[in-house]
Image: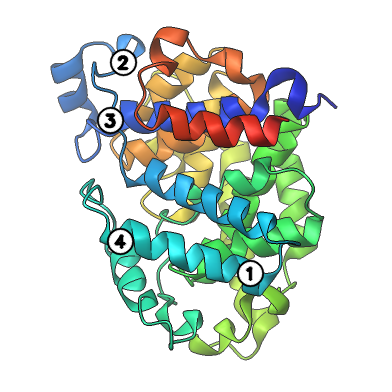
Amino acid sequence: MTTLVHKQAATGALTGLALGDALGYPTEFDDVPTILAEHGPWRELPLPRRACVSDDTQMTLAVGRAVRTAMDRGLLTPSRLASTLREEFVDWYQSPQNNRAPGRTCLKACSLLKDVSRPWQDASQIHSKGCGANMRVAPLGLVPGLSDEQRAGAAQLQSALTHGHPTALAASDLTAHAVRLLARGAEPTGLVGLLRSYALENRSRYHERWLGDLWRRAEDAGPEQFIARGWDECLAILDRLQHVLRTVSPETDPCLATGEGWIAEEALATGLLCFLLFVDEPVTALRRAACTAGDSDSIACLTGAFAGAHLGAEAWPAEWADRVEYRTDLLTLGALWDA
């Protein structure tokens, strides 16, 4: 296994995530013919001169800062992380910079999180499985020193504060696990199989220490049935991804194969698809992800996180990396975790 420090996987993943966001932000909500008409061939899609990012990168940084602050205060525990996440999410909600077309689920949940007398579980949008939770979870695949239980529980908790649907929880856990595997040197060719095995192993495991009684807000018979719903949807999309990887053309919109990415499991699968189509061409992978009919910035965010975790900081052209918005914040967290 390659160690994080040698290739600067954390810096690579966070930079790739933000670059994907900046590349996909202008193309989100457009179909592929419109994108091609406005920007030219997808393999030459330019990074905007002002490489501004969306709420995807803002929320990723919020999660990263929350984890850092919680760990500065001691062991990463559910109550400690829930507290710092809540602070960061409310700060983001109230920031004048929160003007990048954020999703309704995040806005509604963060508004409710302002009331500190309310348990966070009451703010969670239990029926939402939008991609807003797993597009921001990459830090939990990068921060060193966590046990498997801490990493999985924390990945699901950061989702649950806003997106409480079991598929949002499972997809966030899977996304963090994929980033972790790639950062530690797992071979991309076996990645989908490893993720499928992880999903099967965890299918009926409800992280009560991290999630509390969140499951009671849904209509399932018990916590195991609640979380199994989410893992089953993720397993179904992983099976679909495994099939299309053998047949899909790189020239075809990836959303046609694995979904448009507005929901958690589709964002994970389509981000993985773009990465796996161009394992050794990270910039091409980002361009393919940004030239899609779906949630282009979130798909490209995930593609960039996977590619950067796999290849490290040198995956990205300096001329691109140096001008992406929030560059200093991204480098600060990346350097901390790479060290």
Between discs 3 and 4, the one toward the N terminus: 3
> Residue visible at 72% across and 49% down?
196
Q: Does dot 2 land on a helix, a strand or a loop? A: helix
Q: Relative to 63, does residue 228 appear above or below in the rendering?
A: below
Kind of residue indicated by mark 1? Arg
Residue located farthest toward the front when viewing the structure as drawn = 73
Label 4 crowd bin: few (<14), some (14–19), many (20+), radius 10 Å: many
258 or 217, which is in the foreground?
A: 217
Query: How far apart are the two marked residues, 1 and 4, measured between alpha carbons?
Result: 20 Å
Q: Which mark is residue 183?
A: none
Kind of residue indicated by mark 3? Cys
Query: How far apart are the two marked residues, 3 and 2, measured between alpha carbons?
Result: 19 Å
Q: Which mark is residue 42?
A: 2
Q: Does dot 4 land on a helix, a strand or a loop? A: helix
Q: Which residue is mark 3?
A: 52
Between discs 4 and 2, the one toward the N terminus: 2
Kind of residue indicated by mark 2? Trp
Q: Which residue is mark 1?
A: 80
84 or 13, which is in the foreground?
A: 84
Residue 294 appears in which quarter of the rendering? top left
Between discs 3 and 1, the one toward the N terminus: 3
In the figure, is residue 259 to the left or right of 308? left
Q: Which mark is residue 93?
A: 4
Between discs 1 and 4, the one toward the N terminus: 1
> Residue visible at 54% across and 12% down?
281
Q: Relative to 52, does residue 201 appear above or below in the rendering?
A: below
In the figure, is residue 5 to the left or right of 266? right
Quarter of the image with the N terminus is: top right
- Please say if the residues under marks 3 and 4 sit with CB atoms less than 8 Å apart: no
